[in-house]
Amino acid sequence: MKPLRLSVRTKLTALYGGAFLIVGLALLIVNYLLVSSTLPDTAAFANGATAGAQIEVARAYPMDTTSILPAERAQATQLVATSITEYRSDVLSTLLWQSLVALAIAGGLAVLLGWLMASRVLRPLHAITSTARKLEVENLDRRIDLDGPDDELKELADTFDGMLDRLAVSFDSQKRFVANASHELRTPLAVQRTLVEVAMAAPDASPEVRKLGEHLIYTNERSERMIEGLLVLARSDRGLTARAPVRLDEVAATVIRSASAMAEEAGVTVESRLRPRTVSGDPVLLERLVTNLVHNAITYNRQGGWIHVDIGGDPALVVRNTGPQVPLDAVPALFEPFRRLSGDRTGDSRNAGLGLSIVRSIAKAHGGTAGAEPGGRGGGLVVRVRLP
């Protein structure tokens, strides 16, 4: 059984209300004791009242010495004592019940005021929590900027803002480094590719040199694809600087046509259902998103398999494919950079493992999400991209 979880506001309200009730109860007991000690003592008051009555009778009838007999005096004393006892009981009972009612009403007001006070005290913490929930790597520009007295809560908010400033600088530096490093690496790779191709084209090149050159070109192409993927990933992680209306169905149709030769070579059938859908975003990044999904669906498939591309409302894009079985617990790792499954996916060295990472990053840059699930009996994946 899960333990009951109480909010801080509820705990503070209970603390305020409990403290008030304890103080009020102590005050009620003290007031009860003071009033009880102030009321006349029953026996002393009864004897005094009877003696006073006897003196008054003696003064009125000085010659009558038998006006008040001892038995009558005892009866009168008992009557007075009973009256005083009932009076004390009524007074104390009335005082006790009225005090309890007043304490209950005041306790209810104390709980209500405690709830309002706790809400006011915790308002800065709600602002901090709300800001923290909205933060993402692509959106580190939010700040709390708490106004108010220079107390512990403002110090906490200012410390949180300072931490966000440092995180924003760190992430921005990292993204610039990835983009700059990837850009600088493209030139030497292009030079290496040219030199290898020139060496292979030489008339006196031996078969061993040509075989080595083919292997070097293959490795070079893979490195170029990885660097290109890093550049796209760094660009999408920085967010969008401009947006334009993009027909996602037309983008998907273009990508499918360009991938037809690749699908035919792999023995994979491509099916599609492209309904009109306009998205506000970057056309280049959106084309890369669709391209990565279609190429992945073809690459990680089987001979005689199929892929299906669906453009619609929500989700905006769904790509299904047949292929190797994908364990459910392994799906989240596929969206991490340089992560592949074991077996066929690990053994395929044609890709750098950035395809789905780029898909997720581009979807996030457009304010959407990307998710996947195993394809069922036919294997493969079902990838869904939601875009606003």
Image (tube, helix red, strand yellow):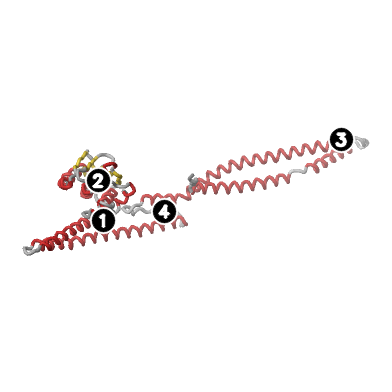
Residue 271: x %, y % from top left: 20, 40
Report how far apart the C-alphas of labels 1 and 2 lie in the structure. Answer: 30 Å
Q: Earlier in the sequence, mark 1 or mark 2?
A: 1
In the displayed structure, does residue 79 sit left or right of residue 213? right
Q: Secondary structure at mark 4?
A: loop
- Tell me if I can see residue 210 in this picture: yes
Report how far apart the C-alphas of labels 4 and 1 lie in the structure. Answer: 32 Å
Residue identifier under label 4: 146
Report how far apart the C-alphas of labels 3 and 4 lie in the structure. Answer: 83 Å
Amino acid found under the numbered disc labelled 3 = Glu
Q: Secondary structure at mark 3?
A: helix
Q: Earlier in the sequence, mark 3 or mark 4?
A: 3
Determine whether label 3 and label 4 are within 8 Å by CB. no
In the displayed structure, does residue 258 sit left or right of residue 75? left
Q: Secondary structure at mark 2?
A: loop
Residue identifier under label 1: 234
Report how far apart the C-alphas of labels 3 and 2 lie in the structure. Answer: 115 Å
- Number of numbered discs present? 4
Q: Nearer the viewer, mark 4 or mark 1?
A: 1
